[in-house]
Image (tube, rainbow, N blue to C red):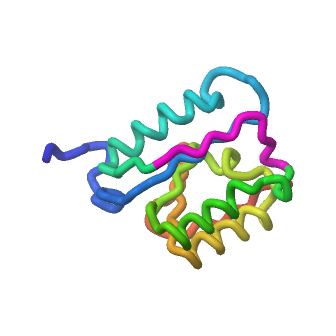
């Protein structure tokens, strides 16, 4: 296999991933769900990952965590089906805008069931835990 100079590490190679994209309004550009999916699929491909599914949330605000059933559903899917290893979102603000308590609750639950979170658009370290400190 040809070496990938952008992602020389095998850290993510062979891991199964689900893309989660969210858009609260009908804006275009890099925040459209289509643009997010295209970018995330390419990020996964370049890392040698295996694409499993897409979760597309159109018209869903990230600021109201109590209305977000998608995140508990992903945790339950991992528990019952165990058909993915990684949840990939473009950036943390696509995951939640519900503040650090919501984000860190979700990260804790992901860790408990064995889901790794990858947010390639934030340029976060990919070899250690993430601490979310978003404003509510």
What residue lies at 34% left-to-right and 51% top-to-bottom?
A: 49
Which x, y percent locates residue 119?
55, 51
Residue 96 at x, y = what percent?
73, 52
Residue appearing at x 45%, y 61% in the figure:
84
- Could you tell me which residue is drawn at 53 percent across and 56 percent down? 87
The percent coordinates of residue 24 (x first, y second) are: 77, 35
Q: Residue furthest top?
A: 28
Residue 46 located within the stretch drawn in magenta: no
| Rendered view: 112 above or below 92 | below
Which residue is depicted at the point 56% across and 34% down? 36
Q: Is residue 73 above or below residue 48?
A: below
Q: In which image quadrant can residue 127 be found?
A: bottom left
Placement of the C terminus among the 4 image quadrants: bottom right
Q: Which residues are magenta?
A: 53-63
Residue in front for this viewpoint, 19 or 133: 19
- Which residue sits furthest bottom? 112
The answer to if 56 sits in the magenta stretch is yes
Q: Position of residue 41 (x, y in %)?
A: 43, 39
Left or right position of 87 against 5 = right
Q: How many marks?
A: 0
């Amino acid at each position: 296999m040809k070496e990938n100079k952008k992602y020389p590490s095998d850290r993510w190679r062979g891991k199964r991933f689900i893309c989660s994209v969210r858009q609260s309004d009908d804006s275009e550009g890099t925040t459209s769900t289509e643009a997010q999916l295209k970018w995330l699929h390419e990020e996964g491909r370049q890392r040698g990952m295996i694409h499993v599914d897409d979760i597309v949330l159109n018209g869903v605000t990230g600021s109201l965590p109590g209305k977000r059933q998608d995140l508990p559903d992903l945790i339950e899917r991992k528990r019952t089906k165990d058909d993915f290893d990684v949840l990939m979102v473009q950036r943390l603000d696509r995951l939640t805008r519900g503040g650090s308590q919501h984000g860190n609750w979700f990260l804790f639950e992901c860790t408990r069931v064995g889901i790794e979170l990858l947010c390639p658009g934030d340029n976060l370290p990919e070899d250690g835990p993430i601490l979310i400190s978003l404003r509510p």
